[in-house]
Image: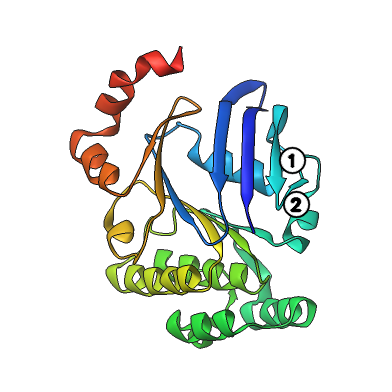
Amino acid sequence: MSLVVEDLHVESGGREILRGIDLEVKKGEIHIVIGPNGAGKSSLLYTIAGIPRYIVKRGRIILDNEDITSLQPQERVRKGLCLMHQFQPQIKTIKVADLENVLVSKFGTSELAVKAREILEIEKLRNRYLFVNMSGGERKRLELYLTLLTRPRVILLDEPDSGVDVDSLVKISEVINLIIDSSLSCILVTHRGDIVNMLKRVDRVHVMCNGKIVESDGKDMLERVLRSGFRKVCEKLKEKLE
């Protein structure tokens, strides 16, 4: 399943946060989005996922040749597009096992989800309330698993490596490699290169500054950008923002 973003201009809270994003992720590709805080990386994923507070003022989001710009988030999930959130709310009335059972009954199961369940050690979390008193690594592992239970074909990962311990990072990267092997399309937002270096393949890296993608290239660009720092890169490419 392919994903195309055309000339995307987005506002949130009365402020323009995306200023003309063009992006194409072909079937089976994994794209990395990096950039400084406030660049619009997470906002891009939330807009693609259809989160209501992100208002599209111009442009289109196309999923497998269908314009989904006006669809609600749940409709996008049914079409195979799902977001792994960076921050998960704690829900003290729902146990992990209960939500897992609901998702399996609604979407069925998949070989990918079964493998991910074991790697991410979800069995240890099943009797706990949803994200309540969980470590950063536990929260991210659980969120990734719940995302896969919707049987997505395009996966949006918002900083799956943020605030996690080394063991969880290894497990999460192992599951993302399974996603790559499964020929699913993926956009992964990250601030750091650790997880990228654990991935068996990266098709494209995009640098965002001030609501725009200012440079796109292969995996080698990531090391260069992280070495020099986002600020220097954004200043060097300032003319592209004007």
**Which one is in front, 142 or 105?**
105
Above or below, 47 against 86 in this view is above
Place of residue 222 in the rendered image (x, y in percent of width and height, measured from the top left)? 29, 45
Amino acid bearing label 1: Pro
Residue 73: image tag: 2
**Which one is in front, 74 or 196?**
196
- How many neighbours does mark 1 have within 10 angstroms: few (below 14), some (14-19), or many (20 or more)? few
Q: Secondary structure at mark 2?
A: helix
Is residue 132 at all visible to an observer of this figure? no
Amino acid bearing label 2: Pro
- Find disc 1 in the rendering and name its residue: 52
- How many neighbours does mark 2 have within 10 angstroms: few (below 14), some (14-19), or many (20 or more)? many
| Res. 94 image quadrant | bottom right
| Res. 169 image quadrant | bottom left
- Which is more N-terminal, label 1 or label 2? 1
Relative to 31, 59 lies left or right = right
